[in-house]
Image (cartoon, rainbow, N blue to C red):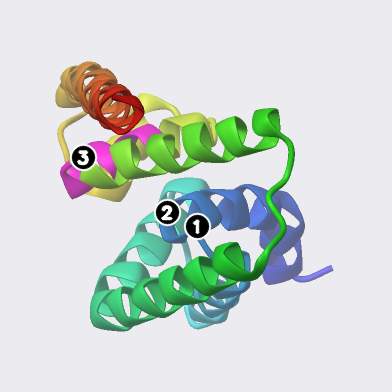
Amino acid sequence: MTDVDRLFRTYNAALVRYLTRRLGDRDWAEEVAQETFVRALRQTSIQNERAWLFAVATNLVRDEARKDMRRRKHLALLAEEERETMVEPEETTIERAQEAAMARKAVDALAERDRLALLMREEGLDYSEIAEALQLSPASVGTTLSRARRRLVESYEALHKSREEREKNAAS
């Protein structure tokens, strides 16, 4: 088994999950993960494998930010068209979908560094790995995560309150 095979077997699932959360598109996440492992082939040595892989994947996503915006707009249009043509599911399914959409919006509303730190931590990266991947000092990772969590809660609560107000206005 080659080093890249071992890297792939060890880190691919976590990297794809991270990228799927980051991008909102599993197919695209798998493409970026694949490119990350292709770049690993070119490396003669990697000090901290997981941090290196997550940093490269994050940089690949940043490099394709314009494509990301176009894809998101396209996916949003497709999702809207599908919702318009679908028969309405049960109320609980609608509520779950709305909650998931609000959670995604709340995550998307975070500053990029905060969003990436939270997603990396969710994937199990430790503070030193997050620091290396995001080019932060290890001491600032805790502060970054704490601030990100607080802002995520604030953003989610604001979205939730806004939704409740819209529903209340629509009912009256």
Residue 94 horizontal/vertical position (percent):
61, 38
User: Residue 73 in magenta?
Assistant: no
| Separation (CA) of disc 1 from disc 3 | 16 Å
User: What is the C-alpha distance between the residues marked 2 and 3?
Assistant: 12 Å
Q: Relative to 95, is 4 on the left or the right?
A: right
Residue at image position (48%, 79%) is: 39
Q: Residue 4, can we see it? A: yes
Label 3 neighbour load within 10 Å: few <14, some 14-19, many 20+: some
Q: Is residue 83 above or below residue 119?
A: below
Mark closer to the chain start, 1 or 3: 1
Relative height, residue 123 to residue 87 (above, below): above
Mark 1 — residue? 19
Q: Which is nearer the eye, 126 or 110?
A: 110
Q: Are marks 2 and 1 in contact (CB under 8 Å)?
A: yes
Element type at marker 1? helix
SS under mark 3: loop
Main SS, magenta residues: helix
Residue 2 or 33: which is nearer the viewer?
33
> Could you tell me how far apart the alpha carbons at marks 2 and 1 are, in whole angstroms?
5 Å
Task: Name the residue type under label 2.
Answer: Arg
How many numbered marks does the figure carry? 3
**Residue 29 visible in image:** no
What amino acid is at disc 1?
Leu
Q: Mark 2 points at which residue?
A: 22
Amino acid type at mark 3: Leu
Q: Position of residue 127 (x, y in %)?
A: 35, 26
- Magenta region: 111-118
Numbered label attached to residue 110? 3
Q: How crowded is mark 2: few (under 14 residues within 10 Å), some or many (20 or more)?
A: many
Residue 117 lies, with reference to residue 76, above or below; the image says: above
